[in-house]
Image: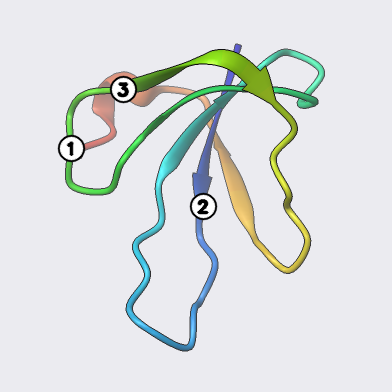
């Protein structure tokens, strides 16, 4: 699993979330909504549409605050 924090600059107030992807970065397994400490796990992993969006990989999520 790999963790990616969205850093997209939106034209309107849209929160960016923390996403959990598989090792190949092809399927989204879960995400943590902005401002939350809990992850939402998807029943069926899916491909995340990243067009026009920016992400940074987070290596140590233990020190990442909600």
Q: Residue at x 30, y 41 (%)?
A: 33
How far apart marks 2 and 1 lie (CA) works out to 15 Å
Q: Residue at x 20, y 37 (%)?
A: 65
Circle 2 residues within 10 Å: few <14, some 14–19, many ≥20: some
Relative vertical location of residue 32 with respect to residue 38 in this rendering, above or below: below
Circles 2 and 3: CB distance less than 8 Å?
A: no
Circles 1 and 3: CB distance less than 8 Å?
A: no
Q: Image quarter for residue 28?
A: top right
- Tell whether 65 sits left or right of 8: left
Here the colouring is rainbow
Residue 50 at what x, y percent from top left?
Answer: 73, 53
Residue 21 at what x, y percent from top left?
Answer: 63, 23
Disc ID at residue 36: 1
The residue tagged 2 is 6
The residue tagged 3 is 39
User: Mark 2 falls on what kind of element?
Assistant: strand
**Seen from this angle, which residue lies furthest front?**
43
């Amino acid at each position: 699993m790999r963790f990616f924090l969205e850093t997209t600059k939106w034209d309107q107030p849209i929160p960016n979330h923390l996403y959990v992807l598989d090792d190949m970065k092809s399927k989204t397994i879960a995400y943590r909504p902005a401002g939350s400490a809990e992850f939402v796990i998807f029943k069926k992993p899916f491909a995340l549409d990243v067009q026009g969006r920016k992400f940074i990989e987070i290596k140590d999520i233990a020190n990442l605050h909600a």
